[in-house]
Image (tube, grey):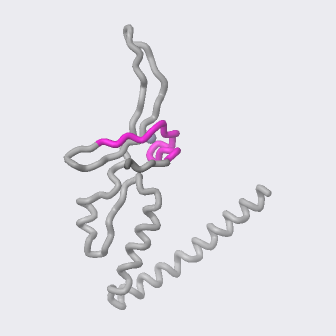
Amino acid sequence: MKEEIRMDKCPRCFKNISWIEERVRKGRRYYYAVHYEGHSRVGGRVRRRIKKCYLGPRVYEYVSRMHSDIGLSLHGFMVRDRFLKYLEMISGCIPYLDPEVLRDVRDRLARVIPIIDDRLNYASRGKRGLE
Ligand SMILES: [Zn+2]
């Protein structure tokens, strides 16, 4: 069964996506956002004008191999929740890190939390403003 892919805006050019095209090359699947830009008549034939933006594969297999030591597999635009997947994968490594690295991780996370709180406060003010 083919998976339904929902993506309205192109992450590369930010235009609306008309449809997603899947191509298989050497057994690997690659994805393109297709933008229908109307049609034109060339000679007696009607040709549709389309522009395609490359979205990559679901998983960058070769590049992911280079990150296997930290348990990270890198995803293409097709995986919409890849940011959370990366966080989960990185979190899975934490029990195996040296204490020195763990202290750096903790310090960096401590710097990120206020940024997240600011963003959430801003977002909630925006919602209240619409009410
Ligand atoms: Zn595009």
Residue 50 included in the magenta stretch of the image:
no
Q: Nearer the viewer, residue 83 or 125?
A: 83
Q: Quadrant for the C terminus, please.
A: bottom right
Q: Residue furthest front?
A: 1
Residue beneath the point at 42% across and 56% down:
79
Residue 52 horizontal/vertical position (percent):
39, 37
Residue beneath the point at 37% across and 55% down:
76
Residue 13 horizontal/vertical position (percent):
47, 42
Residue beneath the point at 30% across and 42% down:
23
Q: Is residue 75 above or below residue 23?
A: below
Which quadrant of the picture is home to ligand 1? top left
Q: Is residue 76 above or below residue 89?
A: above
- Residue 130 lies left or right of residue 4; in this view the side is right
Q: Residue furthest left?
A: 26
Q: Residue furthest top?
A: 44
Instruction: State the image quarter where residue 46 is shown.
Output: top left
Q: Is residue 17 above or below residue 48?
A: below
- Residue 128 lies left or right of residue 5; in this view the side is right
Q: Nearer the viewer, residue 83 or 109?
A: 83
Residue 124 horizontal/vertical position (percent):
70, 65
Q: Could you tell me what secondary structure mostly forms the magenta stretch?
A: loop
Instruction: State the image quarter where residue 86 is shown.
Output: bottom left
Residue 72 horizontal/vertical position (percent):
33, 69
Q: Nearer the viewer, residue 88 or 53?
A: 88
Q: Is residue 99 above or below residue 81?
A: below
Instruction: State the image quarter where residue 21 is shown.
Output: top left
Looking at the image, how many numbered discs can be counted on the residues?
0
Q: Which residues are magenta?
A: 7-23
Q: Residue furthest bottom?
A: 99
- Residue 113 lies left or right of residue 67; in this view the side is right
Residue beneath the point at 46% across and 61% down:
81
